[in-house]
Image (cartoon, rainbow, N blue to C red):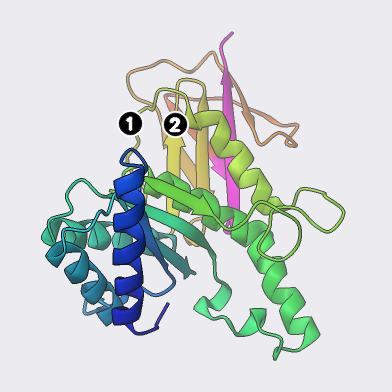
């Protein structure tokens, strides 16, 4: 949102104050920003809308239980970097208890909206949305959700889980490749996390639990992935990489090597003997 902040802030002040008075237990926040600011030489420059909105909330002691913002990008690391910047900004205005909600995000091919526009040629639009829903989109989503696990953000909502453009299913309801990224992550999200080192921000990300390892090679030049296990002997485990891969793999001397050229995601299932 790039509209003038004065009118929006005044409307928020009136509405939020009234609702909080009548329903004090409700969480109130906003403003679901499409544009929160930009980075210049690595320093976050918030938009005037953001600074005016937060200043108005601080000055008027308005309720702000959560601050919501959007981000579409072709760099999964930007989501984490921007989340840290938003957190510092909120704390700087005294909203240390306000939650940070990334309530709309997705892969933006070429970091441009042109391919999604009606002005783009039909073949260009098709290529654009196939990238978003295809293997590159899947690798982006998995890398993003893995990196966001350690970011100072309280909620992240992918846009969206329905049919068609930006979604996870085609017009017939068939899951697209980007669906598999969330399907894979759901299997590890509620398990105890194991420590992982070697991630390359925005390029290569991995997460692990006791019996499952996820790897996203979004755009790292390495074609071969090497996993070294420490603190646990996995030599006797049966290793299955991706559900459609019939080849069985093994840890040898604590190491597992397999091919995963970008863009791709890998799910490594470890089955004890």
Q: Nearer the viewer, residue 254 or 158?
A: 158
Q: Which residue matches tag 2?
A: 208
The percent position of residue 15, horizontal first and vertical second, equals 36, 61
- Residue at 50% x, 62% y is 219
Q: Nearer the viewer, residue 152 or 62?
A: 62
For residue 152, side relative to residue 1 (left or right): left
For residue 1, side relative to residue 20 (left or right): right
Looking at this rendering, what residue extends furthest in the right direction?
172
Could you tell me if the residues under marks 2 and 1 are in contact, i.e. CB atoms within 8 Å? yes
Principal SS element in the magenta part?
Answer: strand
The percent position of residue 79, horizontal first and vertical second, equals 38, 60
The percent position of residue 241, horizontal first and vertical second, equals 63, 34
Quarter of the C terminus within the rendering: top right
Residue 99 appears in the figure: yes
Q: Does dot 1 land on a helix, a strand or a loop? A: loop
- Residue at 39% x, 27% y is 193
Measure the alpha-carbon separation of dots 2 and 1.
7 Å
Q: Is residue 144 magenta?
A: no
Q: Which residue matches tag 1?
A: 195
**What stretch of residues is rendered in magenta?**
258-273
Quarter of the N terminus within the rendering: bottom left
Q: Is residue 272 magenta?
A: yes
For residue 91, side relative to residue 131 (left or right): left
- Residue at 24% x, 62% y is 85
In the image, residue 135 sits, relative to residue 43, either above or below, namely: above
């Amino acid at each position: 949102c790039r509209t003038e902040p004065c009118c929006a802030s005044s409307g928020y002040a009136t509405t939020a104050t009234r609702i909080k008075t009548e329903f004090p237990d409700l969480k109130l926040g906003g403003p679901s920003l499409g544009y929160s600011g930009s980075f210049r030489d690595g320093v976050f420059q918030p938009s005037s809308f953001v600074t005016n909105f937060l200043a108005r909330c601080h000055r008027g002691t308005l309720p702000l239980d959560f601050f919501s913002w959007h981000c579409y990008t072709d760099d999964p690391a930007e989501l984490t970097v921007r989340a840290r910047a938003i957190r510092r900004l909120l704390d700087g205005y005294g909203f240390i208890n306000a939650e940070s909600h990334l309530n709309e995000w997705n892969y933006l091919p070429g970091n441009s909206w042109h391919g999604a526009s009606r002005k783009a040629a039909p073949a260009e639009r098709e290529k654009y949305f196939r990238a978003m829903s295809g293997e590159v989109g899947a690798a982006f989503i998995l890398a993003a959700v893995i990196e966001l696990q350690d970011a100072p953000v309280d909620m992240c909502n992918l846009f969206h889980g329905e049919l068609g453009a930006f979604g996870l299913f085609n017009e017939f309801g068939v899951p697209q490749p980007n669906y598999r990224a969330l399907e894979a992550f759901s299997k590890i999200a509620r398990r105890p996390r194991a420590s992982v080192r070697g991630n390359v921000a925005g390029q290569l990300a991995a997460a692990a639990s006791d019996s499952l390892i996820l790897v996203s090679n979004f755009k790292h030049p390495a074609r071969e992935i090497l996993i070294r296990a420490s603190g646990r002997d996995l030599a006797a485990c049966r290793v299955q990489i991706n559900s459609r891969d019939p080849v069985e793999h093994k840890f040898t001397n604590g190491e597992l090597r397999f091919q995963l050229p970008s863009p791709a995601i890998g799910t490594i299932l470890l089955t004890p003997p």
